[in-house]
Image (cartoon, rainbow, N blue to C red):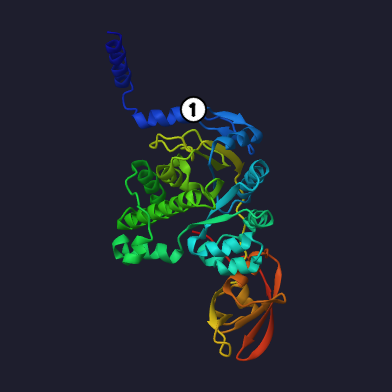
Amino acid sequence: MLNKKLLFMAVIIVMGLGCSSLPEIIGADRLRNFPSNVSVGDIVHVATGEKITFSQLADSFDGARIVYVGELHSNKESHDVQMQVLKEFYKRYGDNIAVGMEMFKRPHQDVLDKWTGGEMSEEDLLSSTDWWHEWGYDYSLYKDIMDFTRDNRIPVVALNITREFQRKISEKGLEGLSEEERESLPEIDTTDFYHRRYLERVFKGHEDMSDAFERFYLVQCVWEDIMADSISRYLSSPQGKDKKLLVFIGGGHIIYHFGVPKRVYRRNHLPYLTISTYELRDLEPEDEHPLFVWNIPLQPADYVRVIQLPEKQKKVVLGVMIQNVKDEKEEKEDRVAIESVLKDSPAEKAGLQAGDIILSMDDVSISKVYEVIHHVGKKKLGDTCVIKISRDGTKIYVNVTFFEIKGHGKE
């Protein structure tokens, strides 16, 4: 009789809610549990809404075999959080750890092994992994992490597939791959309801919904199942069998757990926890909280670390399209040629022309495209650079001054 009364009361309550939908109510309840006032540096245990210290967060590592730290790729403070966790991991568990990284592609695992074995320079690491093409973000954001892994001989596990493979899947779908390529893939799950709903929201911010979304969604699922497969394979391998794994990965791949963490857990059922970094911003009462999407009734992470929303910095550009070309004598690609020069750019103002071969920058020898990108990336507005070029067989020195290009970087 009591149960019937409770059921009746529940029905009355639901009816009384009127137009409010259940997801809206759930979303409000989840957000109500999150502290109304957070500051940069706060760590929040999402399930309880409690603010905790880093030491208390670190104590939770003991119960997890895998710890995911979601990053905001271009935010330096996000990477500082990763570095703090890495140091604590090493302090607590010593040689019994490894680091999995989305930034590196599986075909480059042997390169990473040489890096952590102290057998490779930073220049060779970037070149051999084709960093600027395969990942593209400023390496200086990851330098402390990579140096720490090398200095302490911590294994780094490449998690991802190459851009070329992603492009092929996007263009042809799984059915358009060769038999060998299909066999290289793990089982791909495209059935997660809330995962799809989340990515539909992301995609709508870029373009109208169309068949393009299906390609986008397939690539995302392949991407995440490949990374999940990489993690699971390593932890079950002789090298990783007894290790704890720290995973550095884009925050979108671990939010709400349904990206990589859920796919890994389905494979090995190992305990894990997720740490998301959240850029603090001013929100109006009517604004949707970035961590609590109203129609996804899931907790975004186990822990949230609040970081500063960085000011938009004006990037320095040279204003050229470049490519690697073969040296006529050596018959190998070790020359960087300028394909075209952007109008009213620092390159044009300095007199650089299409067809010029870049030999050095500030007396640093140049032979690869990524070396130009890396060198320019260290410059600020107002800085200068002396570029040595070869033009029709004549060596020329060109002085470039970097300035802001109107309209560059705007939507």
Give the residue at x 49% y 52%.
237
Whether residue 7 is situated above or below residue 151 in the rendered picture: above
In the displayed orientation, state which residue is furthest to the top.
1
Q: Quadrant of residue 368?
A: bottom right
259, 359: nearer the viewer: 259
The three-letter amino acid code for the residue at tag 1 is Arg
Q: Quadrant of residue 218?
A: bottom left
Whether residue 248 is situated above or below residue 340 in the rendered picture: above
Rendering coords of residue 389 (x, y %): 65, 83
Rendering coords of residue 48 (x, y %): 52, 27
Give the residue at x 44% y 27%.
29
Give the residue at x 42% y 42%.
262
Instruction: Work out whether residue 339 can be spotted.
Output: no
133, 391: nearer the viewer: 133
Mark 1, other Cα within 10 Å: few <14 / some 14–19 / many ≥20:
few
Whether residue 297 is situated above or below residue 118 in the rendered picture: above
Q: Circle 1 — which element?
A: helix
Whether residue 42 is situated above or below residue 169 in the rendered picture: above
Rendering coords of residue 160 (x, y %): 47, 57
Count of marks overlaid on the render = 1
Which quadrant of the rendered structure holds the N terminus? top left
Circle 1 residue: 32
Classify residue 370 as left or right of residue 269: right
Give the residue at x 42% y 32%.
27
Rendering coords of residue 321 (x, y %): 53, 75
In the displayed orientation, state which residue is furthest to the front.
238
Instruction: Work out whether residue 72 can be spotted.
Output: yes
